[in-house]
Amino acid sequence: MAPFVYSTLIISLGLGTAMTFASTHWYLAWMGIEINTLAIIPLMTQNHNPRAIEATTKYFFAQATASATLLFAAVSNAFLTGGWDILQINHPLTSTLTTLALAMKIGLAPLHSWMPEVMQGLSLLTGLILSTWQKLAPFCLIYQIQPDNPNVFITLGLLSVIVGGWGGFNQVQLRKILAYSSIAHLGWMILILPFSPPLTLLTLFTYLMMTFSLFSSFMLVRTTHINSLSISWAKIPTLTASVPLILLSLGGLPPLTGFLPKWLILQELTKQDLAPIATLAALSSLFSLYFYLRLSYTMTLTMPPNNPAGTLPWRLNPQHNTLPLALTTTTTIFLLPATPTILALFTF
Amino acid sequence: MQLIAKLIKMNLIAKLTFNQALTQMGYRRPGQPREDKPPWWRVKFDFSKGLKGMKRHFTLLKEEFFAQFVGPMGKPIIEHMLEQNQVLWEFRGPHSLQEWTISCDREIGGKSEVYLKVGRNNETCLLYGTLCSDPPKDGETRYSGYCTMRAKQPLASFDRKRYHDWSSFNTLHLRIRGDGRPWMINVIAETYYTHQKDDMYSYFLYTRGGPYWQDVKIPFSKFFLAHRGRVQDDQHELWLDKINAIGFTLGDKADGPFQLEIDFIGVCKDYAHTEDFAYEKYKRNPEV
């Protein structure tokens, strides 16, 4: 893609998210989200192959439907309450409609069907933008909705955790696995939102760090299928040691950073007398842990000292800048001891 | 009731419900008038057939459900990790021919013939027939003379489409015995839009002839995109995660008998082959 066009699209992505962050009016927030959607469409169709075009079309349909629903909810709220302020979405109907529209935007179950197919058709870099940056603007709006009844959020959250774990069970394509992982993590974020919004933010930021480091690792070894992980030890041996830790952090195992949000969410849910929901969420995350462990097993635990699975690929110098990967991997693995500091940062 | 029966007999209901302009079912041979019967006219409604169908579909559904506990797509993960070869179609009896469809230009009024039978000792399949490139005399068709054999789309329970996932592999491996004619191998991948339904990825298969078998290995990077037989400018590599079918076509304009014997069709992973795509991808807006 021409550098001028590419930089325009990247700046538009930033502009859209920034507009949504800075807005108090529903219309401006909606515009920011639309700019985001339209800016990523050409990035998705950079490669002219049918799977990418299919992914772009499905993404556009899902996002356009959600945007239309969101605008309808905002207009209905203005009609019913007389205000366009984002914080004043008080009517139960419009609040629920907005929540569902934003849930479809980010890919929460049961509105998640577009996500795995879309991720499968994209390159790893575009998939990374979709999984991380594109979640920020809708989350900013979800964060500001103050629901009277938390049942919608609990239902969406639980369903997402279960579907995200169950869906990834049967996958061998890494991008689809990451899509289901994203759905599961979003479920955890939404689950705790009515009770402790700062914990949602904390979970979001840890998820962004972990996903960024995993995507970057896969980009570095240029692998999109589970079987090519088994020979990736010959390309960059250091990653063979760090990627399982990133995966286990995504799975929420102590003493890694990923344990922090899950621990605090389960604690908060228990404090809110929602122990059965907490138990169900914790058990459902075992499904996700299973396929993370499967990836770790493929990549690291099957590294043979002799009898490799195939001829070794050439070990070339990495073309990408590895500093962001190094930073995010460090934060993904080693941040748990800094829990009090992080909590102080988020509970403002 | 008598009036309704009369209407049915007079085909009035058929004409009222059947909109000729909207239906696209079936192939209309050029020069022939359009068929005036509704699509459901040809269906045979039978209760026992329905029961057998339900039993088959629910059995398939049960197998699919329990297969995911074995591993992704019913195979253990260790198999996904280590597999380097997989035989997809091997012709070991008459039942293996059920997975294939044959066709030739007889459907459009031509004079070719094609047959498929099991080879000697139930070890192979033999595609044979006669090619005739005389076009049908219908005033429309200018070229003729082809015959083809294509695998049927695999179906899951309740006739849902199932796809072959060849993303662990990068080479097509065939063991064939031909008669020296050049064939075309077509791989049909899953598409999304209606205008892509005739998209096909093709490559040539030159047979050697004689009594000796050929082991043919064609990397998937060599397959080029064609639409209705026309090679496209905007080329891209074949995505192997959703493959519908594979086919063989003969259209070398050499009239006369032909035969192609196939032992097996499989896929393999050649680690020495690192090419992504063999052809230049057409860039309409070059980078400034």
Image (cartoon, helix red, strand yellow):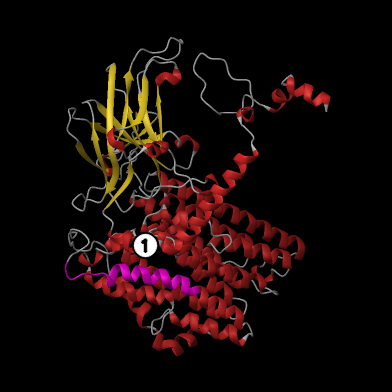
Q: Which residues are magenta?
A: A285-306
Is B232 on the left or on the right of B213, as rendered? right
Instruction: Give the quadrant of the N terminus of chain B.
Output: top right
Q: Can residue A193 be found in the magenta stretch?
A: no
Q: Nearer the viewer, residue A48 or A110?
A: A110
Picture coordinates of residue A50, whole percent (x, y)? 41, 44
Category of crowding for the residue at label 1, using alpha-carbon neighbours closer than 10 angstroms: few (below 14), some (14–19), many (at least 20):
some
Percent across and percent down for residue B33 are 57, 15
The image shows residue B240, relative to residue B260, as above or below, that is below
The image quadrant of residue A101 is bottom right
Element at label 1: loop
Left or right side of B286 for A20: right
Q: Residue drawn at (25%, 64%), measured in percent from left and top?
A: A232
x, y percentage for residue A127?
A: 41, 59
- The residue depicted at 58 percent of the width and 71 percent of the height is A158
Which amino acid, mark 1?
Pro
The answer to whether residue A214 is left or right of residue B109 is left
**Residue A21 seen in the current view:** no
Residue A304 lies in the magenta-colored region: yes
Identify the image quadrant of the C terminus of chain B: top left
Q: Position of residue A138 (x, y in %)?
A: 55, 65
**Camera-side residue of B87 and B200:** B87
- Count of numbered badges drawn on the protein: 1
Residue at image mark 1: B76
Secondary structure mainly formed by the magenta segment: helix
Establish if A117 lies above or below B205: below
Q: Is residue A218 above or below residue B185?
A: below
Residue depicted at x 58% and y 18%: B34
* Most foreground residue, A154 or A201: A154
Residue B244 visible (yes or no):
yes
Image mark 1: chain: B
